[in-house]
């Protein structure tokens, strides 16, 4: 090798080391040629499924590279911002905030923690960053109704899930409940007390909802012993304290094994199936303004998709279109919004104190109407942490999805098309009308006409599910049909709806898949 070749090759090597690992110093990547990097196992996405996969593989002694398109917020030193004062974390590369309402805030584009994907009849909110959706959700860890789980997953052993995988997920995610004495005395939960009292008066059954927020920390927040987070209006743009997001649970344990490498701000655009059944990924490394700083390739022996429902579908369908990877016809089918439907009521308790000026951002109350054969739904009594007593109660209803949608790839836009319109949410709207009519008849109040679309948020989706459904598009443990070394472990495995907030189900399902995939030696490399 002459001097010129030496400088070129070593320069390439050092630049690769610099760019490939923005979070954890020098990378262990093996540089082959022209920016091609070898990795034995790659996981795309650091949400619930990706975090479970990372931990279980690392515990088994496997070397794992996890690619996350968002920022590693803990390592960045940046703070999450509250609802009423959106900052850098409030939107992914947008010029305006993207909350479900009150979007009057201009912003400088930044790789924020919350993103919104807009289709004609629906808007889908997703998390960006190390920890995925766990960074921006309300933390409600709800176990689905067993009878509905059996309907949705007829080929799974429900008894085993309810005795083993759900308890395991609850333990690893550090799910807990607030003390009732605290909820009764805390002024930040007046909205919840009013919501529950009025639901009971209307004849509905209420329930206490477990959460991954540390309620012992919250009690110290309330006593002003520690910095406030949930009681400071932080939630959908991230929580700085108190919340046990995945970077503090699964991913922290996986990193402690020494077998996990996390590369943040690494966006996988598509991938190729090689003749030896390995995969080559086309990757962009971006900066916090979304500018592509380097494009390179990673070749891996095993590939796990955990980019969330929309992310995994995008990768599969774009790779099919561009690189002709084989896909089962079931990919893209049985998509749903988890029955998400937002609504609200005004003049709630208006003449006896309203719902309070201060709202904790962490929901703890639910309305369980699932056993009503005509109007089956679960409803979250949601906070409105805007710092004013609007005498308004928000509700996130979760329904069955009677008419699933379909996802395809549009070559003209280089993105997904979603077959989903008002007909898919017609039954959900009927449930919302019934619920509001019943509540207002018993308690007074009116529909919140100024929120959403005349009070009906049919186009709001926090929980996209399906499209790569287990036992249809994959085998019984998430291995994609027509592939030997490609696996899926996120919400896309779930057909359309779980009947409740889905992340506990996604976690339990990922635990089930990874345990069995490891037993069958799918990750021998």
Image: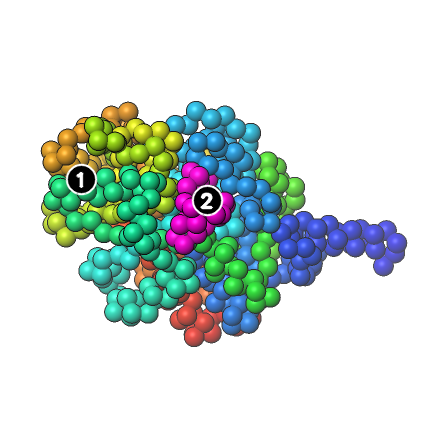
In screen coordinates, is 364 left or right of 264?
A: left
Q: Position of residue 261 (x, y in %)?
A: 59, 59
- Residue drawn at (61%, 42%) of the image: 286
* Magenta span of residues: 215-243
What is the number of the mark on residue 224?
A: 2
Q: What crowding class fits label 2: few (fewer than 14 Cα within 10 Å), some (14-19), or many (20 or more)? A: few
How many labels sit on residues? 2
Q: Quadrant of the N terminus?
A: bottom right
- Predominant SS of the magenta segment: loop
Tell which of 309 and 507 is nearer to you.
507
In screen coordinates, is 445 left or right of 74?
A: left
Q: Is residue 94 above or below residue 505?
A: above
CA gap, disc 1 and disc 2? 30 Å
Tell which of 363 and 247 is nearer to you.
363
What is the number of the mark on residue 198?
A: 1
Q: Are marks 1 and 2 in contact (CB under 8 Å)?
A: no
- Residue drawn at (46%, 44%) of the image: 224
Q: Is residue 366 above or below residue 118?
A: below
Q: Position of residue 175 (x, y in %)?
A: 37, 58
């Amino acid at each position: 090798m002459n001097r010129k070749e030496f400088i070129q090759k070593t320069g390439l090597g050092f630049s690769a080391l610099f760019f490939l690992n923005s979070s954890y110093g020098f990378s262990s990547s093996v540089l082959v040629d022209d920016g091609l990097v070898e990795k034995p196992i790659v996981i795309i996405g650091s949400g619930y499924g990706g975090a479970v996969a990372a931990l279980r593989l690392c515990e088994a002694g496997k070397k794992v590279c996890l690619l996350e398109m968002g920022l590693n917020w803990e390592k960045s030193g940046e703070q999450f911002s509250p609802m009423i004062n959106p900052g850098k974390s409030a939107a992914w590369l947008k010029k305006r905030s993207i909350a479900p309402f009150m979007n009057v805030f201009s912003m400088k584009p930044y790789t924020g923690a919350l993103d919104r994907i807009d289709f004609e009849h629906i808007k889908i909110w997703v998390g960006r960053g190390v920890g995925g959706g766990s960074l921006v959700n309300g933390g409600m860890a709800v176990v689905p109704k067993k009878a509905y789980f059996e309907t949705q997953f007829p080929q799974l052993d429900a008894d085993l899930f309810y005795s083993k995988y759900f308890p395991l997920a609850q333990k690893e995610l550090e799910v807990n409940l607030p003390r009732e004495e605290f909820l009764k005395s805390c002024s930040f939960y007046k909205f919840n007390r009013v919501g529950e009292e009025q639901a009971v008066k209307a004849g509905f059954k209420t329930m206490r909802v477990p959460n991954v927020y540390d309620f012992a920390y919250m009690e110290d927040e309330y006593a002003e012993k520690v910095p406030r987070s949930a009681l400071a209006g932080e939630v959908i743009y991230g929580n700085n304290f108190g919340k046990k997001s995945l970077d503090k649970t699964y991913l922290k344990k996986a990193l402690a094994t020494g077998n996990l490498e996390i590369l943040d701000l690494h966006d996988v655009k598509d991938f190729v199936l090689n003749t030896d059944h390995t995969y080559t990924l086309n990757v962009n490394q971006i900066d916090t303004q979304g500018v592509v700083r380097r494009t390179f390739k990673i070749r891996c022996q095993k590939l796990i998709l955990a980019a969330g429902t929309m992310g995994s579908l995008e990768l599969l369908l774009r790779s099919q279109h561009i690189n002709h990877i084989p896909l089962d016809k079931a990919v893209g089918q049985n998509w749903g919004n988890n029955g998400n439907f937002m609504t609200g009521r005004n003049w709630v308790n208006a003449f006896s104190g309203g719902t309070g000026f201060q709202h904790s951002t962490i929901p703890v109350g639910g309305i369980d109407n699932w056993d009503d054969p005509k109007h089956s739904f679960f409803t979250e009594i949601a906070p409105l942490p805007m710092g004013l007593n609007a005498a308004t109660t928000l509700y996130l209803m979760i329904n069955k999805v009677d008419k699933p949608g379909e996802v395809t790839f549009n070559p003209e836009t280089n993105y997904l098309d979603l077959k989903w319109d008002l007909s898919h949410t017609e039954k959900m709207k009927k449930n919302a009308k019934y619920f509001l009519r019943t509540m207002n008849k018993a308690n007074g109040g009116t529909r919140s006409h100024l929120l959403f679309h005349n009070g009906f948020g049919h186009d709001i989706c926090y929980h996209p599910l399906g499209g790569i459904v287990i036992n249809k598009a994959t085998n019984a443990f998430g291995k994609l049909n027509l592939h030997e070394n490609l696996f899926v472990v996120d919400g896309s495995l779930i057909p359309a709806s779980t009947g409740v907030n889905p992340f506990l189900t996604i976690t339990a399902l990922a635990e089930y898949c990874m345990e069995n995939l490891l037993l069958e030696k799918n990750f021998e490399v």
